[in-house]
Image (spheres, rainbow, N blue to C red):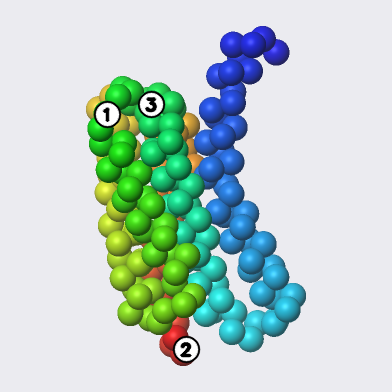
Amino acid sequence: MSETTRRQSIPLRLLVARALTPVVMFAIAELVQLIQHGVSGFHRATLLNGLVYLIGVSGILGATGHLLRPDVLARWIGWPPGSPFQWEVGVAYLGWGVLGVMCPVYGRGFWVATIIMASIFLRGAAVAYVKQMILARNLTPANAGAVFAADVVVPIFLIGLYLTYSGPD
């Protein structure tokens, strides 16, 4: 593998790791829950695991790219580097990421507020990605890949879990 090819594949591997890490952590937490407690309390645990990993960890990881490596991330997404909006997007990611990891400490009102905030952001990002796919034919993995899929699926999953949960806080 040439040095150029290796350097080009590193961003893609990092992007895949950033997109899959919260999903893998969520799956491990679900498995641990099942092994330790069986199905008892599984719905609540799944909701909280989703909030912590699919919102919290995902948001914090998303923030790191936008805040620490904004130009690199912009190139991966297929956007021009140097945009001051990277900072704003990074801080928004960080904000809802912190909300997600705080969810186990607080009750249902906090959970639904976190789901609403993250869902609005994720759905807005998904719309922006679709516009880029259609108007700019931007089909880079960072624009039309796993991150886009998560922006669509995670809100539906968490809203569904929340609406069907009837247990204690």
Mark closest to the chain's N terminus, 2 or 3:
3
**Dot 3, crowdedness within 10 Å: few (<14), some or many (≥20)?**
some
Residue in the picture at 59% in, 11% down: 4
Q: Are marks 1 and 3 in contact (CB under 8 Å)?
A: no
Q: Distance between the residues labelled 1 and 2?
A: 45 Å
Residue 89 visible in image: yes
Residue type highlighted by circle 2:
Gly
Helix, strand or loop at label 3? It is helix
Residue type highlighted by circle 1:
Ser
In this image, 34 relative to 153: left or right?
Answer: right
Point out the image quarter for the N terminus: top right
| Residue highlighted by disc 2 | 167
| Residue highlighted by disc 1 | 83
Mark closest to the chain's N terminus, 1 or 2:
1
Helix, strand or loop at label 1? It is loop
Point out the image quarter for the C terminus: bottom left
Quadrant of the rendered structure where residue 90 is? top left
Residue in the picture at 29% in, 31% down: 132
Residue 28 image offset from top left, x and y in percent: 67, 62
Residue 62 image offset from top left, x and y in percent: 44, 45
Residue 9 image offset from top left, x and y in percent: 59, 23
Q: Is residue 88 above or below residue 34?
A: above
Q: Are marks 2 and 3 in contact (CB under 8 Å)?
A: no
In this image, 39 relative to 151: left or right?
Answer: right
Residue in the picture at 36% in, 66% down: 115
| Residue highlighted by disc 3 | 71
Residue 123 visible in image: no
Q: How far apart are marks 1 and 3 (CA)?
A: 8 Å
Helix, strand or loop at label 2? It is loop
